[in-house]
Structures are given as C-alpha cells and as structure tokens.
Amino acid sequence: MATQPTSSSSSGGSATYGYYETYPVGMVPGPTSVPQHVRDAFAIDYASADLELPFFELYAHVQTRLAEFLRVPSSSASSSSLPYENDVIIQVGEGMLALWSALKSTIKAGDRVLAISNGVYGSGFAEMAKQIGADVRVVEFEYDQPLHDFGRIAEVARSFKPHLITAVQCETPSGMMNRIAPLGRIARDVDALLYVDFVSAAFGADVRVGEWDIDLGLLGSQKALSSTPSLSIVTVSPRAWRKIEAVAYVGYDALLPWRGALARRFFPYTFDWHSLAALGRALDAVAADGGLESQLARHSAVAAYCRRQEDDDDDGGVGFASTVTAIYVPLGRGGFESWAAFDGALRARGLVVGGSYGPLLEGKVFRLGHMGSQADMALVTRALDLLQSVISTSTPSSSSS
C-alpha cells in the first residue's frame, strides 16, 4: 500500500497538505499502527460467531487475558466455571462505546454524578451525564497538572453524595497521567461507583482494577494494544452489576444483556470474530514478550527518552505520560504561524503526529503517541530527529515550494 502523501489545498492558500493511507513515521496517539501478526487475523474466513464453540472459547480466553493484565480480582468472578466471566465485557464498537454503555447502564435521570476533570475527557463525562439527565457536579483542576488535592474531592463527594464518580487515568489531549487509587477510596467512603477511563493508560501504564476499587473500567482495542478500533471493553464490579440491574437500561450499548451471555452462548448481536481474534493475538503477544511488566517497562523507557529530548527544547512540553507526550506547537519558530502549517511541514517529511482538542489546547499543543507498537525506541528516535529537523530548518513557504 502506498505511503506517499496525496495533496490538497490548505485553508491557508496555495500550500498543500499531505494525506496518507499508511504512515512512513506514524506517532498518532491512537489508533496506533497494527502489527502484521494482528492484521493476519482478518485474512481468515471465520465461521458464524453465533454457532461455533471455538468462538466462545476464544471470547473466554480474551476475557481471561484482559482480566489478568488489568488485575481484575478473581474473587469477583461469577459462579461460572470460566474465570472472570462477565467481569470483563467485550463489545463490538470503537472505545467510545465503552464510555457510553457504562454510563447509560448505571445512571438515570436525576442521579448524581461527580466528574473529576483536568482535561477534555474529564469534562466530557460531565456533558455526557447531563445528556442522560443526571445532576452533575464537576471538580476541576488545571489542564497541565495531574489530579491532586484529593481532600477537596473527598469534601465535595461527602456533601454531594454522588451515585457515580467519573475520572480519566490518562488525559490524552494533554498527556496527563492521573492517580486513581485515592478516588477509589473516596468512592467507597460515599458509597458511589467509580467509573474510570483508562483507554490511553492500560497496557502502557499500571492499571489495578481490584486494588483501586474501579467499578467500571473503560478500554478500547486501538491504543496500547495496537489492534483495530473495533472493540470496546468494560470491566464490571459486583457493585456495578447491582446498579446495572436496577437501572435496567435497554439499548444496543446496554451492558445488562451481557451478564451470563457467555455461559448461555447467546450474545445480544452477532459478534465480530475477526476483531476478537485480532485482539486475542495482541494480548497473546504481550504474554509472549515478557508479560505485562515487560510491556510497561518498554513504555516507561520510551517515555523517559522522549521527555529527556523535549526537556532540551525551548518550547517544552505540557504532559509526559508513559503512552503520550504533549508538546507546545513551536509557533514563531521556523516561520510557523499555526498548527496547520507545522503539521503540514511534518507530514511533508513523512512524520504524522496528533493535534489536540479543547479551548485550552487546540492549535497550541501536538502529541506524540508512543503507545503499543509505537513504544519503539528506534521509531521514537527517528520521529524526534525529524521533528527537530523540521523545527530547525523548515518554513511553511519552503516546505510547500
């Protein structure tokens, strides 16, 4: 497949902007590059997932792998002979499905939701809950600081008495990695469920579902697992199941129909066997390559290298998570007057990074996604070399001439 960019006119005038089918040097913070051994799953002519025992055995295997790596406690498994059954729900759909399914399955209009936010996604959960009709309160922190002052959060939680507390472990737009364990203790203290987005953290940073008292843990297949953006994952605690049964939400994204579905071998809809097989291959690769600890060490080493390099840069960074580094766009350097101009110059050299979102970050910050298959020292070194070269030598006019 071609990796040469196609061009179109940019909004700035005659300059061209390169688009790719595959990236020569891809550092987008998700979806990440899918390795060949994972892509190979899509070349198999699978049978019907509704009918065949091997599919259900694969689902159980993937559940168990996820439960092990996310540290879902085995003591919370159901009475089924399959380990962790229904404590890990895998659904067909991109990671946003996990966010919505967990929220709509556990709260109803009038329920109180406490959203802890230091970024785009933390605030986004507040807006999502409002759409469901919840009574929402937000505890906000600076976008360029990790969550802190847990005493203030605890004080608000005790007075507000939420049914649900939401948080984000890794705020990808700003590269902020947040502590979750204190929120678990706060949630237990006020008898609230803890809902945590660890989409950009899991498999690149430590996640402990049981130890941190996470009732609803949210994950997608396309970040540090480097599979396709086709599956969503929700870890569900026994406390969360009780609330799910009480709410009894009905819809394509509902979690309730998945309880006991594997034991019955009857799912709410025909499952995507290809995507499940791809996810299984990605998880098996983690196990074969030294296990989770080796995976986390690789991410930590690459992130540390990225931080050392960017600490020497005049513009500096916003956030340095183990899976993503957020850096200020070098406006005014090299003649770059906008993120679009800078992005175009990078793309002209074959390097593609992520922009950012939200009123405080859009157009001001770009991101290097060193997660999953992209947590590779050689790839990151090449990307940083190209980045420095573009900043040092390029101008918008020279890159488009």
Image (cartoon, rainbow, N blue to C red):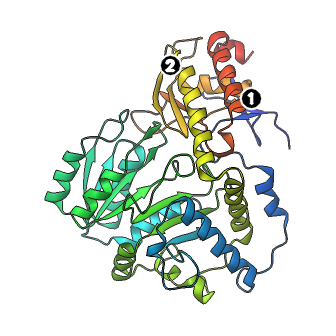
**Residue 260: x percent and y percent?**
53, 85
- Front one among 75 and 272: 75
How far apart are labels 2 and 1 at the CA level? 24 Å
Asked if the residue under mark 1 is in contact with the one under mark 2, i.e. CB atoms within 8 Å, the reply is no
Look at the picture and state if 226 lies above or below 365: below
Q: Is residue 77 above or below residue 210?
A: below
Give the label on residue 274, or none. Answer: none
> Viewed as shown, does residue 78 lie left or right of 148?
right
The image quarter in which residue 178 lies: top left
Residue 311 marker: 2
Q: Residue at x 24, y 70 (%)?
A: 110
Amino acid type at image mark 2? Asp
- For mark 1, does the 10 Å Cα neighbourhood hold few (<14), some (14 to 19), or many (20 or more) residues? many
Residue beneath disc 1: 350
Seen in the picture, residue 377 relative to 198 is either above or below; the reply is above
Q: Earlier in the sequence, mark 2 or mark 1?
A: 2
Can see residue 345?
A: no
Q: Position of residue 374 (x, y in %)?
A: 67, 40
x then y, percent, for residue 387: 64, 21
> Which residue lies most toward the bottom here?
264
- Residue 359 in percent (x, y) is at 39, 36
Give SS at disc 2: helix
